[in-house]
Image (cartoon, helix red, strand yellow):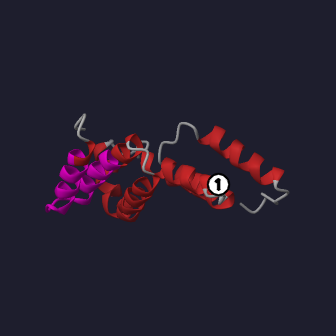
Amino acid sequence: MLEGNLEFAEWLYNEALKMEGTPYEAHLILNDLILLAQKQKDMEKVKKYVFQDVKLYKDYKDELKERWEGTLPQIITFEIYVYLLEREGKIDEALKLAKWIKKEGISYPYYDRVKERLQGKLKNRGEDISSI
């Protein structure tokens, strides 16, 4: 990622997204844009790029899995999406997404901690978590 001139870096990455390439290449660019938006502390941009990458997932999943010798690595986009849902108070949706990530076979090193935290928040609200 380009250091210093964040606006130029963002422009450059967005231009790269416009170029013809594979969904996997777009995923890599979107990862950098997400990191850049986090560095800028711009949650609206983080959301925008996360949603773009989530929409692309089915198109890059197979290539990613192939490059990782049959497994799916940690995909930070989905973990950030869980965080965004939690931040918006959509705890049940965040928990469902976390469980989907694990079921999908995507590496999720903090799954147990995140699951416990989200379940705790739901219990504190008095919500039934047995169906989630």
Q: Is residue 17 magenta?
A: yes
Crowding at dot 1, Cα within 10 Å, few <14 / some 14-19 / many 20+, comes out as: many
- In this rendering, position of residue 113 left or right of residue 39: right
User: Would residue 68 be seen by someone viewing this image from the given angle?
Assistant: yes
Residue drawn at the location 43% of the way across and 45% of the way down: 41
- Residue 88 place in picture, x, y as percent: 61, 58
Q: Amino acid at mark 1?
A: Leu
**Is residue 18 located in the magenta-colored stretch of the structure?**
yes
Q: Nearer the viewer, residue 20 or 102?
A: 20
Place residue 50 in its image quadrant: bottom left
Identify the element where label 1 is drawn: helix
The image shows residue 38, relative to residue 96, as above or below, that is above
Give the residue furthest to the left: 20
Q: Residue at x 14, y 61 (%)?
A: 19
Q: Most extreme residue toward the right, as rendered?
A: 126
Q: Closer to the camera, 40 or 94?
A: 40
Q: Is residue 10 left or right of residue 65?
A: left
Q: Position of residue 129 (x, y in %)?
A: 78, 57
Read off the residue under disc 1. 95
Q: Quadrant of the N terminus?
A: top left
Quarter of the image that includes the C terminus = bottom right
Residue 53 image position (x, y, % from top left): 37, 58
Up the image or down, 47 lies above or below 116; here it is below
Which residue is at 23% across, 56% downward? Answer: 14
Assign the magenta stretch its main secondary structure.
Answer: helix
Does the rendering let one see residue 75? no
Q: Which residues are magenta?
A: 8-33
